[in-house]
Amino acid sequence: MINIYEVGETNAMIEKENLDVRTITMGISLLDCVHDDIDLMVDRIYDKITSKAGTLVKTGEEIAKEYGIPIVNKRISVTPIALVGASACHTPEDFVRIAETLDLAAKKVGVNFIGGYSALVNKDMTAADKMLIESLPRARSWTERVCASINVGSSKTGINMDAVRLMGDMIVRTAQATEKEDSLGCAKLVVFCNAPDDNPFMAGAFHGVTEGDAVINVGVSGPGVVKNAVAATRGESFEVLCETVKKTAFKVTRVGQLVAKEASKRLNVPFGIVDLSLAPTPAIGDSVADILCEMGLEAAGAPGTTAALALLNDQVKKGGVMASSYVGGLSGAFIPVSEDQGMIDAVGKGALTLEKLEAMTCVCSVGLDMIAIPGDTPPETISGIIADEMAIGAVNFKTTAVRIIPAIGKKEGDTVEFGGLLGHAPVMRVNPFSCKEFVDRGGRIPAPIHSFKN
């Protein structure tokens, strides 16, 4: 039970420190919508999503009003569409029809994003997988709310370098297709290694095939809360710092658990997990980079940054698992450049580079996230960046991801504007040396030797 003192603490976190439930995400299985007639299949998809999630937004708003807890987003994730559309889709354009159907369903129920326009190709690609990937530029430019993710590697299978090479091309083409919006399409497209089935955060959410017919997953975020708690530990030992972060994460997770169970009860959909992720926003005081600075760094990217981020990520997870038996998804600290004013400032100072961000991804929850790069960056260079990040995930048995935006017409030092939660981003320098011969080899990088654990 939450006592009256905790209620007071929680109210202060909400009013003064930007604590919020970042998303209630309903996962919906579309496996029973599969049919070899595409017209019938898209009708089934639309009907199932709108019937299952018809009251999702209303329910989220009611909970937020009754409990006084901000619930920023209401979202949907679905079964990876490459699996759903395999029987009916014979061209990339057929998959675009499904993307448009998902978009219409999302608009009908009022959610801001729907995830699951996805393919799981960590070992190889089926014909359907490849068609979905090739449809990405059109699907992303012709829809408003659809988010896409492609899993190209895992610790058990290695890295599918054919898919990595293809994704370099698709990211560039998606950027070109959405050039008038500062290449916004790439902000809703992420490449994964070890993608979790129950992640409620976009753009990487999808409803895994091991899940039930429907599920409620909740993502909680509180960088401002953690920053204020850390600020009170100045001059104290690492032991005190760790205990403070852990206890704060515990309290934040309790809020998520409360909202998740209430949403589950009202929607009559099973509760899945709480994802406790320190997901920043462009708002001042809602920054992961600022937490690192409160620990004693002059700027994010200074020597010691990776160690500070590792400490933060670990203590957040420890606090979360004490508060709920069902902590899942990604859970930890996100470092998206465009969505974190502290990260943006660090890039502007020259303290934070793409290479330092890659080092930080070894210990954080996701990877290279919401990073703008020059629009003339070659596709094979983007593939090389993806391959590096996938290698970190595969070798370390962790989820890693790349959400990178080659901003067409922009060069290093320019700024791209996305608006809302996606924020704005400085265009960062990319290593100019070529990796084309490497990524053009094709085939698969094998799983690491320590993956053999039967």
Image (cartoon, grey):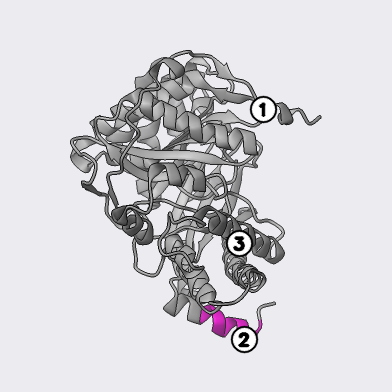
- Residue 104 x, y percent position in the rendering: 35, 41
Amino acid at dot 2: Tyr
C-alpha distance separating marks 1 and 2: 49 Å
The answer to whether residue 352 shows anywhere in this view is yes
Specify the quadrant that holds the N terminus: bottom right
**Residue 158 disc label:** none
Dot 2: few (<14), some (14–19), or many (≥20) neighbours within 10 Å? few
User: Which residue position is annotated with label 2?
Assistant: 5
User: Which residue position is annotated with label 3?
Assistant: 316
Read off the magenta span.
Answer: 3-11
Q: Is residue 372 above or below residue 85?
A: below
Amino acid at dot 3: Val
User: Which residue position is annotated with label 1?
Assistant: 448
| The one of 380 and 40 positioned closer to us in this rendering | 380
Dot 3: few (<14), some (14–19), or many (≥20) neighbours within 10 Å? many
Element type at mark 2:
helix
The answer to whether residue 147 shows anywhere in this view is no
Q: Is residue 117 above or below residue 358?
A: above
